[in-house]
Image (cartoon, helix red, strand yellow):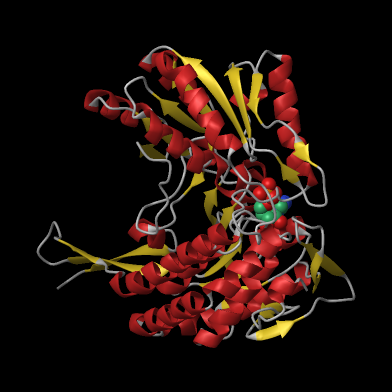
Amino acid sequence: LTRHLTSTDLLRDAGYVNGNWIGGNGAATFDVLDPATGERLATLPEMGAAETAAAIDSAYRAQPLWAARPAKDRSALLRKWHDLIIAHADELAAILTAEMGKPLAEARGEILYAASYVEWYAEEAKRINGETIPAPSPDRRMLVIKQPVGVVGTITPWNFPAAMIARKIAPALAVGCTVVSKPAEQTPLSAIALAVLAERAGIPAGAFNLVLGTDGPAIGKELCSNPKVRKISFTGSTEVGRILMRQCSDQIKKVSLELGGNAPFIVFDDADLDAAVEGAMVSKYRNAGQTCVCANRIYVQSGVYDAFAEKLAAKVSALSVGNGFDEGVTIGPLIEEAAIGKVEAHIADALAKGAKVVAGGRRIDGPGTFFEPTLLTDVTRDMTVAREETFGPLAPLFRFETVEDVIAQANDTEFGLAAYFYAGDLKKVWKVAEALEYGMVGINTGLISSEAAPFGGIKQSGIGREGSAHGADDYLELKYLCMGDV
Ligand code: ADP
């Protein structure tokens, strides 16, 4: 174990099923690596379809008992879990930085962000109110009650190893669902630590199960095909989202999908340029560009293009790349070698078609998978960066002339997760905000995520919302009760 993790007691080398820490079926194991050093952090048991089925059985048995607990009890247990997460924020942040690479301060921010969802749904648990409807005839009464969907399978990615899990588990548990959770194989340690704290908080055996393994397809298939699972909640690539939705179609299983984005970030001539540069920095380079809401295509109106590029280049060059545990580091490593390959391919394609590098542009020699924060100018719509999500520290600057033109370009993608724009004129603000085909729009801000707001995408970026009261609805069924002869 790295020296940063030697003092923590939040780690186990096991999955968590029915309140027990368990190994895999055989001797097979997999390693968790520190992307900043290549060092091995942990060796964990490979769990597959059989262990997933056992976890589903445990969740299935626990579900009616959990749902029958008064909402106030579920709320109190979630609140306790929240308090433990806050009390262990530094340890959880160190685990997160070790396995994922983001700078320690950013990791701590993610832990607080994850905790905010647990707190929100601890509160929301008590307000799952139904409806009464005035009946159209005098001898009837009509009501709607809300009930948990049942056992939920969650599959989450490596880029927010703590927050993505909290955002699903907290609302599911709050409303009376139980969960089988499969974290990304690159970042299972944060999930293990959260499960240790859930156990300590007193969340009962079987309510939250954790399955570890590198065979995502086998675990996913069991979750989708096992009839005891009523819903799949997935965050990850659109490609895998399609597979899961297809697999869920046999049993008309409910799905919530938070998939890829290709966020436009638009700067109009009348924008506050310094604020726009600041917004672009947080939206693009946070998590080294590895978030689904990161600005992926930056459109700048021609009147301010050169000034914006110059200011942004200065900020990008001032970023400090290194091990997330080191003081002052603002950009950590990319998650793995393949991520570097994608950034390099996007840059090579853009340069071949006439773009210019004004900052960064190269990988940094190992150990670790580091890439220089990069800024490209003179980017055009025929380049790969115009269509594909880079998921790395690369900002391409496109030039545009008119509002209509930039709206058309911004919407010219199958994705519809987040969009951002900076402008002054109120008429334009409303016009653009309403015209952008995205689930979330940041107006004069580059940071939009909050537990109090519905996070989610339209088009091929997903189905469903996480956060806010809407996030609880994703784990609830409506039941209409009609009383006759009254
Ligand atoms: P990323 O590019 O962020 O790794 P993925 O969509 O590949 O995105 O992975 C997100 C999660 O989905 C991970 O936990 C991964 O193990 C899991 N996964 C990958 N392929 C499948 C699959 N075919 N079925 C179910 N889960 C999968």
Q: Is residue 235 above or below residue 67?
A: above
Q: Which quadrant, please, contains the C terminus?
A: bottom left
Residue 232: tell me if it is visible.
no
Which quadrant of the structure image shows residue 208? Answer: bottom right
Image quadrant in which you'd find residue 152: bottom right
Q: Is residue 292 left or right of residue 171?
A: right
Return the residue nearer the eye: 455 or 207: 455
Where in the figure is residue 367, as x and y percent of width and height?
83, 52
Coordinates of residue 404 in the picture (x, y in percent): 38, 15
Residue under the point 65% across and 69% down: 95
Q: Nearer the viewer, residue 217 or 391?
A: 391
**Residue 40 lies in what quarter of the image?**
bottom right
Q: Is residue 387 above or below residue 404?
A: below
Q: Is residue 482 visible?
A: yes
Q: Is residue 232 left or right of residue 186?
A: left
Residue closer to the observer: 173 or 404: 404
Viewer-proximal residue, 300 or 25? 300
Query: Viewed as shown, does residue 175 lie left or right of 379?
Result: left
Give above or below for 71 relative to 432.
below
Number of numbered discs visible in the structure rendering: 0
| Image x and y of residue 303, in percent | 40, 14
Q: Residue furthest left?
A: 138
The image position of residue 350, as x and y in percent, is 68, 20
Instruction: Name the residue at 69% across, 38% down.
Output: 372
**In which quadrant is the N terminus drawn?**
bottom right
Q: Residue at x 52, y 66 (%)?
A: 111
